[in-house]
Amino acid sequence: MSSPLDPSDAVDLLVEMIQNACVNTGDPDSGGEIRSVRTIQRYLGEEGTIVEPRPGRASVIYRIPGTDPDAPVLLLIPHLDVVPAKASDWRYDPFGGVRTDGYVWGRGAVDMLNVTAAMVVVFRAIRDGLLHPPRGDVILAAVADEEGGGAYGAINLVENHWPLVACDYVLTEVAGPRIGLPGAQVIPVTVAEKGPAWRHVTSRGIAGHGSQPYLRSNAVLTISEVFHRIGSQAQPVVITDEWMRSVKYLPVSDDLAQRLMDANTLDAAIDEIATTDSTLARWIHACTHLTFSPNTISGGGKINVVPDWGEGDIDIRLLPGQDASDIDDHLRKILGPDLYEQIEVEPVLEMEANGSRPEGPLWEAMADASEIHTGIRDLAPTMTPVTTDARFFRAKGIPAYGVGLFDTSTTFAEMLAMFHGVDERVSERSVELTTEFLATVIERFGERLPGR
């Protein structure tokens, strides 16, 4: 399909944003998203509205007025920050933006600077009249700190600058390659995500001389046993409506698909898939379980002193319909009353899972675009186990989706492995296809709105 916009611009933008190295370590002074804000400002030739709650932690917002002031507002909200990368593990410099053999390599290539670049290019094309004028306003908010929870980015805008991003529909991440068996592949659309419910766990003991450990209350042993049980015990299975809607699109046999919808056969089916595709199996497990991952641990202070404290952090992810009581129930069950009473569990982050129904004018616009670009109207509504900025808008009842269009050079499982992984890369053609696809989605969205 021909287009009046130049999708190759998105590839150039992607390269520059990778090279900007807006690395979010979780430290409030990391990120430096102002560098990619400047890149976008140069490309658009406009200052936009900058929101910078901390020096360098900047987001930039632009708006194109629609032709109908009563029409729904569409928000494009990509993020600018990326997670760290260890250069020695990569084939190419993760912040070099290397272009070779039709691919762009670098941290952020699929999470999510590829879509960020595409959205910026499409936004300029709309503004410059290269695409149909939108019915309702179109907002572009390129934000900071998505990889750190959004305190300096999306959640700051929602809570403190709502008029800048007030909207009726949202497009963001996660975008992925087509999914399904060969000959029956469709575009996945992220419609839901799990809720982060992180916990800090503390154990207490009684200090004593390390030469005499007998009958001592060793807090490090307590926290180690707690974390061992949490990490080694089976995790609770939950078959959600969101999962049931997506199973038929998985690249598995009909028999496996049936077993993946039954709580009694699910884990064995996942184990079977893991023998040939551990990445896909890991994703399926995350989308069907309340997950607990003990990720940090420390304790004591001196080699010859029995420790009187131990502590650590658990990354817990809730599925739709779950809350803190489900976490407590599981911990009590696997730890038993004696061990459970020896620890203190403190919430660090608490957000319920949320999602959007696969319906309405934006959903139909994405289906239109899929039919135009791939010949297939069907879309695969998927849930992601990671968190995105979409959750802040879904919490307000605003439909939010993540989508793009990739070529066939990368599989869905290969893309999953690159998220926060080594050798992250995307084909240049995929970036161009995503740009063209999103342009079509936005045009069709205006045509799908009632009242035309």
Image (cartoon, rainbow, N blue to C red):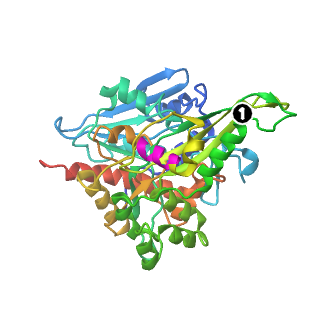
Specify whether 297 is left or right of 128.
Answer: right
- Residue sticking out furthest to the left: 451
Q: Position of residue 420 (x, y in %)?
A: 60, 48
Does 255 appear above or below 213?
below
Residue 124 placement (x, y as % from top left): 39, 40
Q: Is residue 162 magenta?
A: no
Please state the extent of the stretch shown in magenta in the rendering.
Answer: 324-332
Residue 369 image offset from top left, x and y in percent: 32, 59
Find disc 1 in the rendering and name its residue: 299
Instruction: Find numbered disc 1 in the image and state the secondary structure of the residue it sits on.
Output: strand
Residue 425 point in image, percent of width and height: 60, 54
Viewport quadrant of the N terminus? bottom left
Residue 328 in magenta stretch:
yes
Front residue of this view, candidates 8 and 15:
15
Res 120 → quadrant: top left
Q: Is residue 269 left or right of residue 243?
A: right
